[in-house]
Structure formats: C-alpha cells, structure tokens
Amino acid sequence: MTWRQELEAFKAENPGVEITDDSPWTSTEAAPAEGETQPAETPAEAPAAETKPAEIETPAPDGTAEEQYSLAEEKALTPQALNELIKGNDALKAALEADPAAKGALFRMAREHAELSQFKGIFPNAESANYAKKTAASTTALRMRFQAAETPEGMAGAFDSFMQEFAVIGADGKQVMDDTGQPVYGDDLYLFGEHVVDRYADSTLAEVEARIAANQYASEADRERDSDLKLALSIIKDDLHPKDGTKADPDLSHLDENTRKDVQARLDEAKRIEAANAAAKSGVGKQSREQVRKDGTAKFFSEAGKRTFDQVDNIIAGLRKAGAVIPDWQLNTPLPGTNISAFKNAVGSEIESFIKADPYEYNRQLQLEMQYLANPTPENMQQRVKAFDGVLQSRDESGKSLLNRIVTKLVRKYGAEVKGAAESAQGGTAPTASREPAQGGPVQPKAMNADEAWKAAESQLAKEDKDWHSLSDSERLSKVFGRQRQLMTAKR
C-alpha cells in the first residue's frame, strides 16, 4: 500500500482527526515529481498458506466464468442485511458516511434487488417474463378471433391462426418447410384434428344407427342416404383406428341387391385409393415419425445425460475439496427396486421441474425436439444438447450455475436429513436393540452397516406405513434415508 492509500485509509477511519501535512510519511516512498509516472505497485507476495484456494473450481463451459463450490447458504441482499453488514465494518461505515451519494445509491440498489427478487420465483429471467407476456397477449387475441368468427371464412381464419401454435420453428425463427415446400406442424396438431373428427364420427354414427334401427323413413331415398352415411362414417373410423391385418368389409346384407352392388363398387374404389396412398407414403407416416421420436429421445438422453452427470461428479469433487463431507453411499444408493442412483435421479427430477416451471424454456426445448423430428440430423441433435447444456449452466445473481445450485441444494437436504435422524436416535432407544431375555444379561445392540440398514429400513417402513406403496419415489427415499441413519447410529 502506498503512503497516499494509507493516508486516505487513515482519514476514513478517523474522520475527526485533522491532517495538515500531506507530505510522504517516514519510511515511505516519496511522491513522484510533476509529470513523472508513478510505477505500477507490485503487490507483496502472500505467504504460501494464503495462496492455497479455499475452494476448488472445475472448468466451466466455453464463454462462462469459473464458479465456486460451497455449501454455505446464500444470504439475500436486503436493506436490512446491508445495514447489518455496514454496522459490523467500521471502515465501510466511515467511507459511506463520508459519501452520502454512494450510500444512497447502494441502499437504493438493495431495495430494488429485494423488490425484484419476488419475481424470481415466477420468471427466472427476462426472456421468460417477455415470453409469458407475449403468450398471454396472443392467446387472448386468438380466443377473441374465435368468438368474433360469425362466418365460415371467419372461422377458417381463426383456425389458421390456431394452427400456428403447432408450427415447427427453425433456428432462423421461420416455420420449417418439408421437401415439397409445405409448412411443417407438430404431430400434436394432427392428433388434435383426428380427435375432433373421431368425436364427430362417434356422435353422428350413433344417431344414424338409431334411425336405421327405428326404420321410420318417409322415403326410400332417406333410408339409402343413412345407409351410405353409416358406411362413410365406418370407413373414417377404421381409417382413424386401423387394425392389424386386412380390414373386414362392412356388412352390406341389409341392403337390396342393386344398392349392395353400387355400395360395394364404391367401397372397392375407396380401398384402391387407400392402397395407392399407402404406397406413396412409403412408410413415412405416423409409425415412422414415432420411431424417429423414440430413437431421437434415446440418443438425446444418452448424450445429454452423460454430460450432465459428468458435471455432477465435478461439482461433488469441488464441494468435497472445499470441505464438504459427502459419503459415497449418499451418491450411489439406488432407488428401491432399481439400480438407478437415487441422488442422480433426484438431480434429473429437479432439472425437469425447473424446465417445466418456465414456459419459455419448456417451449424452446419442445421446439428443438420438433425441429429434430422434422429433420433428424446430427446438427439438430447437437442443437438440442447445446440448448440443454445452456439451461444447466444458466447463472443466478450469486454466479452459480443451475446444476451447481441443484446439487448443492440436494447435498444440503440429504445432510440435514441425516443430521436430524442422528439427533433423533441419540434421544431414544436404539432401534436395533433386542428385548432383554427373561434370563441372562441384556442383548447388546448390533450396529448395522449402510446396506443392512437400508434393507431393514425399507422392510420396516413397508409394514408400518399404510400409504407406503402410494408414496412417490422421493417421499419413500426421504423416509428410508431417515430410518437408515437411525439404524446406523443406534447407541451401542
């Protein structure tokens, strides 16, 4: 520190002391001559013990700063917290008292931060908030278009706008086109359309069959019309719900011979057209799309899952080197009845909950999935993985990535459960102790290892808890963890 810095620090710490001599202090460097450049100050070397980082960092993804790992709870910055911080630091207090403008700005920032923090639980970032605002406006406008449609043309326009909600959007922000130049929509649009037609066919077919059964027609033409309508609706139903193997022809026995021949001829023509359409599609229909979806999902989770859990392992290593005690059994214990790590399953559930709670991010991930289905290339798959990585590395105001926050939260939670179970066990009878026999000395309690305690905990809870089989995996896991620690920490 230079003499000038020392002097300013002394003034800040002792505002009541008047300094009349600003010349260099004894044993300090002299002030540079006018026009002379002050050489850059070389910081003194810190002792070896101080250069050792308190917390270990792992490499962050490209374009992001490295982050710290710690189990310490992040304190919210509020005016009250800032005031407490200033009270405990005389130098900071004096500096702010000497500069009212800086003090006012600092407290204004704290107030604004506290006010805006309430929205963090609703919108994690500005993109999410803007998306929610835009979607609310467009949904309201779409609903009003349907309400205002009083003609077939008006309804057609409203439905065209509705179809855009299902459009597959490319990386350029425009709707994806297929090889023939037609716009691409998500499969859910076609499923929606099929459902509407299916409901119409069901209700109309029921009415037609009721009229045919009653056989109260004013003319033969009306009866024939209903017979034709029944046949047409049956063909539509069969097309919507194809059965394995060759379709059976509709029963035409109730028709007179001439009508039966006419209907059979039309049925044969319909079958010919249907066969031609099936050949033209060459297997790229619904089943093919479903296979692309299945293969793409497996490929995505294979790559994204490995990358995610490699990062989880790095975060655990960072937390351990920063001083956290995280036993291997906590990380490796499988979910009941599976070989899946309960800890990593909880990490995956937290990530899924985060994405689904943010409509903007959920929609973005969905659009990338549909983009891949429309064009299943390695480049589109990498776009999905990159976007997923971006979610995991999104930082909050503390500078920690989402994945770091999730892992830290779960480690804290599991640690609190173990601590609570251990403290509970200290005040009660050891769960592993046997009853004293009628003769002889008392049986000494036997301590269980982690595997024995886990199996015993599952067995006990399944018998004790009447709702055990209706609990979620996370609820069962939490109960088993608590009981396991009780069994392992029994008094000897």
Image (cartoon, grey):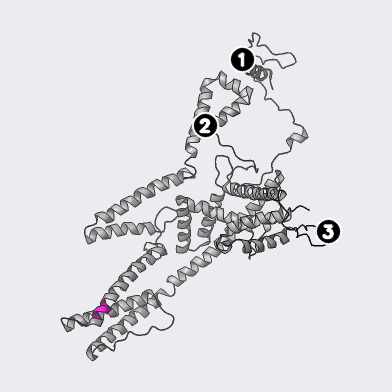
Q: Position of residue 275 (x, y in %)?
A: 37, 80
Q: Residue furthest front?
A: 438
How far is disc 2 from disc 1 in space, using C-alphas? 26 Å
When the figure is inspected, residue 324 is found, relative to residue 82, above or below; the finding is below
Instruction: Identify residue type, mark 1.
Output: Pro
For disc 1, the marked residue is 15
Instruction: Identify residue type, mark 2.
Output: Ala
Q: Position of residue 124 (x, y in %)?
A: 49, 45
Q: Which residue is found at the position 15% from the left and 81% from the top?
A: 218
Q: Residue furthest right?
A: 440
For disc 3, the marked residue is 441
Choose between 133 and 369: the one closer to the eye. Answer: 133
Bounds of the magenta segment: 208-212
When the figure is inspected, residue 280 is found, relative to residue 318, above or below; the finding is below
Choose between 428 and 124: the one closer to the eye. Answer: 428
Prevailing secondary structure of the magenta residues: helix
For disc 2, the marked residue is 110
Q: Position of residue 336 (x, y in %)?
A: 63, 63
When the figure is inspected, residue 9 is found, relative to residue 380, above or below; the finding is above
Q: Secondary structure at mark 2?
A: helix
Q: Position of residue 475 (x, y in %)?
A: 58, 57
